[in-house]
Image (spheres, rainbow, N blue to C red):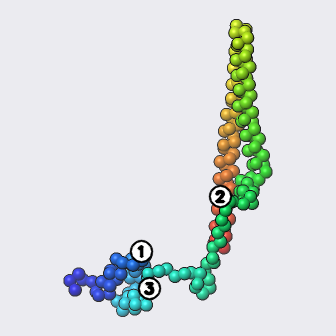
Amino acid sequence: ERSGKSSTEKTFLDEKSSGHPSNAKSLDIIRKSLNTEAELERTRKSASFTQAPDLALLDGQLVSEEERAAGSVKFGMYANYLKMAGGWSFFLGHLGLSLVIQAGRDLGSLVLSAWTAEVEEDEDNVDNNYFLGIYGILIFIGIVAQFIKSYVTAVCTTNASRRIHERLMGAVFR
């Protein structure tokens, strides 16, 4: 044999090029773990590498049949996520900050409307600094509330995701 490979190695190489995609990897692992050509030949003849075993059918049942729900996400899942994010304090804080942000926008529009109406009535006697000051304060409050809401939401949802992941890993590896 000119290639320097035994007949068993040639058979393995032929098997690697066809069949199941995991054949090559499986055969390489076995080949490295076996010492003699006789062991290699015995293993090649006794093992089938074309299909992975169904672990659910093995003795001792390593895995169970997976459940899969279809349809919409149940309310309980959202409630659980909300609880993990911080519960009622997170919900009420998020709602409160959303209301402050929206109130700032609406009040800012009202200030602009009043300012415009004042200018249309008597352009010379309008205190622009007064309206500009009120509008600026409302915009500043809205920006601060939006920043706080975004920060709290990011922190709480990240913590919720971490807690859910820890529970999942705890369930898988217990």
Which quarter shows the C terminus?
Answer: bottom right
* 171 is higher (above) or lower (below) than 117: below
How far is disc 2 from disc 1 in space, using C-alphas? 36 Å
x, y (%) of residue 29?
42, 79
Single out the mark in the foreground, 2 or 1: 1
Type of amino acid at the residue the image marks with label 2: Arg
Q: Which mark is residue 162?
A: 2
How far is disc 3 from disc 2 in space, using C-alphas? 41 Å
Q: Is residue 55 left or right of residue 167?
A: left
Task: Tell me what residue is drawn at x 67 percent, y 34 percent.
Answer: 143
Identify the image quadrant of residue 139: top right
* 67 is higher (above) or lower (below) than 87: below
Q: Residues within 10 Å of mark 1 (few under 14, many from 20)?
A: few
Dot 3 lies on which element? loop
Q: Which residue is mark 3?
A: 48
Which of the two discs, 2 and 1, labels the residue nearer the N terminus? 1
Q: Nearer the viewer, residue 31 or 136?
A: 136
Q: Residues within 10 Å of mark 3 (few under 14, many from 20)?
A: few
Type of amino acid at the residue the image marks with label 1: Pro
Q: Which residue is mark 1?
A: 21
Dot 1 lies on which element? loop
x, y (%) of residue 148?
69, 40
Q: Residue at the top extreme?
A: 124
Which quarter shows the N terminus?
Answer: bottom left
Residue 94 seen in this snapshot: yes
Task: Tell me what residue is drawn at x 67 percent, y 62 percent.
Answer: 71
x, y (%) of residue 137?
71, 26
